[in-house]
Image (cartoon, rainbow, N blue to C red):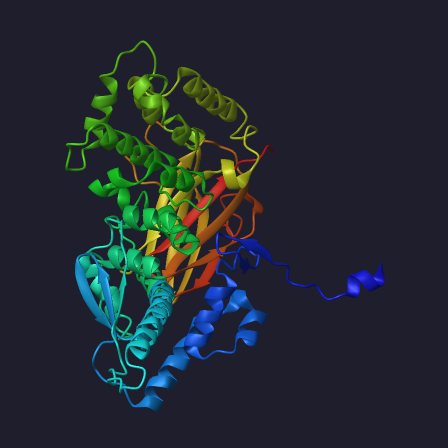
Amino acid sequence: MKMLNSRKTRLERRIVGATNRWRFPQDHFCGDLLALSQMCNTLNVDLDEALKNPDRLCISKFQKLFSENIMNSGTQSGEADVILECLGFKWELHHPQIFQSGTLAKLYLTALIQNTKSSQRELDKVQKAHPSGRIKKRSPVKKIIISMRINDPAVTRVAFALALKNLYMKEVEMTVDNVLGVLASAHILQFNRLFQKCVNMMMNRLAPSTIKNFYLAGCKYNEEQLTLACEKWLEMNLVPLVGTQIHLRQIPEPLLYKVLKSPRLFTFSEFHLLKTLLMWVYLQMNCKVQMIPIHETILAFFNSFPKKCCFLEQDPGQNWMPLFLCLRLHGITSGKDLEELKHINFFPESWLVRVTANHYHALENGGNMVHLKDLSTQAMRFGLLFRQEYTTYSERISIYGYFFEIKGIKHDPTSYSFSMQRIKHTDLECPSPVCEHSTISLRSERLVKYEIQAQALVDGRWQEFRTNQIMQKFGFIKPGCKSHALKIQTVGIPIYASFAFIFPAS
């Protein structure tokens, strides 16, 4: 058995085709031995060397041989030696450049072999016709014509021309308007350097107007780096940026679902996220609307549907049920907001009953959220968008009679800290929307499980900072009233700071 295992594995061959040519059975080597022999003979490559690794027959080696051939023969000039017929144009190219493209290189080598065989037959005919006469010397360089058919509508003549221009120049300016066409051209040409250049540009140019097309391009070409960049960008900007523009309509539903499921999703509050999602549905159903409507218009629209059952259980809304299942409706604690949702008849009644019942149960038990266990998927979430002009910025929130201030401080141009602090209701300015129609807890201490995280974009990459999940009792007296501070160093701006917490049983 040892002797059998130690024997060197030999390449097996099989006969294929009407010509009975030998072919290697490996999937990655699709050529046959006769074609390989002809190619090696044309290029003056050792056939035995090529047979050692037929699947690794390197195009760059051929490129080097061609370049040396031309330099040694002194035939190098500015005149094109390859004509590419594509998109109704004839593009003049030089073979040292086309070897940067896998597609063009294969087309060129195939045409070269066919041209060599044809030339040999012509020479044989001439020699038979003039056995003793002189044969007129032909030009040492003959233009080879290759053709390519492109069916991708994304590839325009301008974009394809830019792609070919990149074969000759390393720095060719592209714009957001033509980068998708250049990307498609690079994919068809198998021009890896240009393809990656397009991907990098798209990742750095994400915006509400480009996020849809860039994401779909990443899915089309299986470019995970690009699709993940789009998902990450939308996680941060869905509520504060995209949700304020008409481009919200263009967000594909699969992308929106992924973002809503992400524990890193940034939102100012759960109600802000709900309003953004309601607006997305409104824009899907009102394609002629070209301006962001006010919230009251959206409420009136959904309230106009028949009252026999809620919107999500009717034909237009059933397909969007999975999106709204991603929301944490228990994070909406305002009685006014809950009454609004009940009035528009959007959610199943059982959903709102369950949310209201959990709120009453928590209030009766001093704020204990016994129905919430997992901080990453169930926590109450709030956010601060810390902009460049801020030195300090804070917001105040109320949960079951407990009042907190979430705060960000800029210490120097690259140093920031984020924290939360319990405050007394008497510290609030009245009248205040935070304390309006709000209960007030007289408990001196409140056990809180929380996590603070901050994210910023720097040179196309997201920096992430976070505390651990911390369990702490919050009182009214320092230092017990203040949380651990998340201290960060970054040049990225704005900073997306998120605060997630639940009130465990105590």
Rendering coords of residue 276 (x, y %)? 30, 36
Quarter placement of the C terminus: top right
Quadrant in the picture for residue 158? bottom left
Would residue 40 be visible to someone looking at this image? yes
- Which percent across, then down, holds residue 162? 22, 65
Q: How many labels does the image show?
A: 0
Residue plotted at (37% across, 41% down) = 255
**In this picture, residue 345 sits left or right of residue 371:** left
Horizontal arrangement in the rendering, residue 175 relative to residue 239 (left or right): left
Quarter of the image where the N terminus is located: bottom right
- Residue 174 in sight in this render: no
Percent from the top left, x then y, of residue 191?
35, 65
User: Is 491 located above or below residue 373 in the figure?
Assistant: below
x and y percentages locating residue 379 in the rendered image: 49, 38
Q: Which of 338 and 119 is in front in this view?
A: 119
Above or below, comparing residue 218 to residue 29 in the picture: above
Is 302 left, or right, of 361 in this rendering?
left
Residue at the image position 48 percent from the left and 67 percent from the top: 36
Rendered position, 209 above or below 340: below
- Residue in front for this viewpoint, 261 or 2: 2
